[in-house]
Image (cartoon, grey):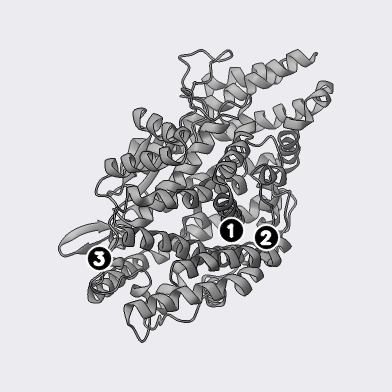
Amino acid sequence: MKTTFEPIEKIKRTFLPEDFKVSTWEILEPYFEDLKNRKLDSKENLMKWLSDVSELEAVISEDASWRQINMTCDTENKSYEDAFTYFCLDIEPKMKPYFFELNKKLLDSPFTEGLDKNSFFPYLRSVANSIQLYREENVAIQAEMSVLAQQYGVISSKMSIEVDGKEYTLQQAAKFLQNPDRKLREEVFRKIAARRLQDKNQLNELFDQLLVRRQQVAKNAGFDNYRDYKFRELGRFDYTPEDCFAFHAAVKEHIMPLQKMLVEHRRKRLGLDQMRPWDTDAEPVGTQPLHPFETGKELTDKAIEVFTDLRPYFGECLKTMLEMKRLDLESRKGKAPGGYNCPLAETGVPFIFMNAAGTIGDVITMMHEGGHAVHSFLSHPLKLSAFKEYPMEIAELASMSMELFSMEHWDVFFKDATELKRAQLEEMERIISVLPWIATIDKFQHWLYTNPGHTVAQREEKWMEILNEFSTGLTDWSGFDEYRKNFWQKQLHLYEVPFYYIEYGIAQLGAIAMWRQYRQNKEQAMDNYMSALSLGYTKTLKELYAAAGIKFDFSPAYVKELGDFVKERLVEAGV
């Protein structure tokens, strides 16, 4: 396991020319033909072939990632959008039949049996799964879906409001919802709600287009619904829809009481008789919102300091990203919403994208995406690109654990002890409040995709039923019925990465377990964390969690156990 940082090394090309760039399908195809027609008549030839496949995958992946990065950083640049669309429609669909043939070639080789099962098992299982799911008629549909999904970012990036005569993106405007001035909070909240509703019909139409295509893909692959297809496509080998339902029930029983406790605590601090939607993130009069940094540079510098305090290796990861210009942190008009860490498979140094506006939420996002970045660095030395295609349940464990590990070092952002305590309490509030939201989104997705052909009205009705099931009932939403009916539209995952959300819940439970481990033995927890992330996807999910020193478990009993641990921390914090 790595403990000292070594300069990251770009994968050395032995198959493609060093100056090769992905531009057209015509220049890519000969390399696929080479791999497709090559004889695998020895274990040595198989290993060389696997290495060449891996190299080709890394080069293509990095090119595709830059197309997406460029487009999300500047959604108003038509050339960036065209480059991304060209890849989705003219290159990716032509690659998929070849990858199908290459996967078959791998499994048909008699020498595949001799590969080390200790590291190849998850990869070979995924290859077999992809072969079973592949349908040629789905290639063009999936290309259309990729282009359509990106339209969500284009639509959302244009959303802005005016406050005191100045224009703000919705991400920037969210900071006003922490302001002690209740009148200002209400004004901003109403403007945000009204702005989102302006595009509700356009977003509904976009979603309906995606739903039709997703159901067709599932049907073509022999599934009754997209939910069952997507579980297979996502490689959910370690849990089932029934396990997800158990998670929903456990959150309702064991986490919702904690969320109610936190909402009531805030209501009392604010001195209110009744909470309204613009009060949920607010501070009492006389208490200014936490303001941990001013600029993207300051956020970067302080994040590096926090990561270095945790482990010097982590700090070096962020320093390297800074040196290579792999950080775009500040919110601006024309930039897509949200935040992400994008692994870059060939160079090995990832890219962090976010919309910082100077809030505590931005600090948390930076810690989160920084955890993903560390995962990218730790797994980069693995021999094959496929070994680094780890599932989201371990990827999100990396990021969410980093949030909690880093909390005791946030004095870098908050010099005042009272403010530091407030910031740490906000993080604990977030990890409690996010679990019911995850249950809400996941349960909604189960309904969406097992009820194909539903109407917008039926969708709104079901959404409200599920939303109310996981709401505390302590906030008065009167006057915002229409906004609440369309509240799901703010969740980009529903548009861009369908069914990817329960992973956050599984990983959040794992992160709480990692935090508990960290409080018991910091160095051991750090060692386990780095060991697990260094494995990439050479082990099953349960084995990766075991390497991290925790259980892969989201049963009601385990959720209660972890909930009790967080409750103890909340009581310590004065809740």
Disc 3, SS: loop
**Residue at 61% from the left image edge and 27% from the top image edge:** 382
Task: Give the x, y percent position of residue 484.
Answer: 44, 74
Residue 363 visible in rendering: yes
Which numbered disc, 2 or 3, marks the residue that appears first in the sequence?
3
In the picture, the quarter occupied by the N terminus is top right
Residue on which disc 2 sits: 554
Tell me how far mark 1 sits from mark 2, CA to CA: 9 Å
Q: Look at the picture and state if 196 lies above or below 150.
A: below
In the picture, the quarter occupied by the C terminus is bottom left
Query: Left or right: where does residue 385 sit relative to residue 158?
Result: right
Tag 1 near tag 2, CB within 8 Å: yes
User: Which mark is in front, 2 or 3?
Assistant: 3
Q: Please tell me how crowded label 2 is: few (under 14), some (14-19), or many (20+) other residues with Cα within 10 Å.
A: many
Name the amino acid type tagged 1: Gly
Query: Left or right: where does residue 534 sit relative to residue 203?
Result: right
Residue on which disc 1 sits: 505
Name the amino acid type tagged 2: Phe
Tell me how far mark 3 sits from mark 1, CA to CA: 31 Å
User: Which mark is in front, 3 or 1?
Assistant: 3
Task: Give the x, y percent position of residue 415.
Answer: 29, 53
